[in-house]
Amino acid sequence: MVVAEVLGDGSALDAGNTAWMLVSASLVLLMTPGLAFFYGGMVRSKSVLNMMMMSFGAMAVIGVVYVLWGWSMSYGSSVGGLFGNPVEQFGLKGIFESTPDGYVYAMSEGLPVIVDVGFQVTFAIITVALISGAIADRVKFGTWLVFTGLWVTLSYFPMAHMVWGGGLLSGDGPFASIAEPIDFAGGTVVHINAGAAALVLALVVGKRKGFGSEPMRPHNLPFVMLGAALLWFGWFGFNAGSAYGATGDAGLAWVNTTTATAAAIIGWLATEKIRDGHATSLGAASGVVAGLVAITPAAGSLSPLGSIILGVVAGVLSALAVGLKYKWGYDDSLDVVGVHLVAGLWGTVGIGFLATETGLFYGGGVNQLVVQVIIALIAVAFSLVVTAVIALAVKATLGWRVSEDAEVGGIDLAVHGETAYETIQQGSVIKEVRA
């Protein structure tokens, strides 16, 4: 029995598009180590390794879980429009089959489905890794790994199914009767989902010792800028890869991604200059991320001119939003809420204004805007509720916080038995060497 004839569409291999999707998957995978640099540079030197390990831990857990039930929950037969059947394709059953002549692969429009599995697992990994920035410096590594497995199963996979797998928030869902929901590469699935989860964890885990009363500045701004550069590079796989082919749509997504990101840097830096009197390197790096986040759901629907508007607004909104934690008293350590939730919401809703075919500013009426608002609000509510249940359950059983001594003295040494930088004192000379 040939698997492609049973589960696929029987199409012949498109080698060019397959190569493009493999490259795109590799680019997106690079984003998580890039995020590790971005987040690692933003924390204090005593917790940089732990911060980077949270990203690598997400890669480890989800890389296994996705093969077991993640793909099936995301793209299997729908259960009430909320998630895919987790056992239908457990362990990637039906995706490929061994025959005497070698492996036979299920196909979908010229692409081996196994390649799509590789592409999609990288999205799941980076989404969970993003959340870790909200709880830097203070949580148990083992608890984080358990949370990773639970959250990706109960929040990410269902959201991916709802938006991309034919579920509630997709073009096959009930809201499509108003207008087809648009989420090109993950505004709801990735950024709103992660941003809302970050807010919940910041509230459940609580503030760092000294938050609001002592400086907690980034220890390595070059790391932050290197991380932002790697994220930007990897994001071309994220957005242009979501065109699922080496096509003009991929080119449009590439240009829109670059344009919106550049505009967001300008928006963030202008806001900083007016408000604080300085345009900072941290602001430039953060503007990169805000622009990338905002254009993610919209990369295939906007013109480059519209992407400039989307990006500038994203930079301004996020630059203003990162200060809310001081006003409202929650400790979102590395501004996941201010950047990913805020820019993700704006990017998702902004489609309703700026989409060239259906946007309000292009004469498309209000239908697209209404639908974009609906899917954004549902995504926020779903993530808030699911994350709260998981976070509180984990708190009651495993506990979130490391000891006060470990947090104050340095979580790297206490939890991992390592330090990023070893200080050696010789007489009156202090030298910093890499561990």
Image (spheres, rainbow, N blue to C red):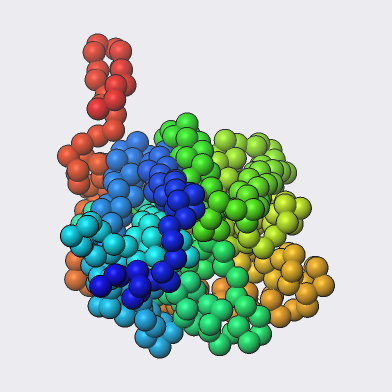
Q: Is 39 rendered above or below residue 421? A: below
Pinpoint residue 25: horizontal percent, then vertical percent: 42, 51
Left or right: residue 208 compared with residue 262: left
What is the tally of numbered marks visible in this picture?
0
Q: Front-most of 108 and 183?
A: 108
Q: Residue at the spot x=59%, y=79% of the render?
A: 374
Pinpoint residue 412: horizontal percent, then vertical percent: 25, 41
Q: Is 373 rendered above or below residue 194? A: below
Q: Residue at the spot x=55%, y=58% of the render?
A: 243
Q: Front-most of 278 and 348?
A: 348
Pinpoint residue 26: horizontal percent, then vertical percent: 40, 46
Left or right: residue 100 compared with residue 47: left
Q: Residue at the spot x=74%, y=69% of the render?
A: 357
Q: Front-most of 98 and 133?
A: 98
Whether residue 270 appears in this view of the structure is yes
Q: Looking at the rendering, which quadrant does residue 376 occupy?
A: bottom right
Quadrant of the image containing the C terminus: top left
Quadrant of the image containing the N terminus: bottom left
**For the view shown, which residue lies furthest in the front direction?**
101
Left or right: residue 416 compared with residue 391: left
Q: Looking at the rendering, which quadrant does residue 424 occupy?
A: top left
Whether residue 334 appears in this view of the structure is no
Pinpoint residue 183: horizontal percent, then vertical percent: 57, 67
Q: Residue at the spot x=41%, y=49% of the render?
A: 22
Q: Front-most of 57 and 197?
A: 57
**For the view shown, which residue lies furthest in the right direction?**
363
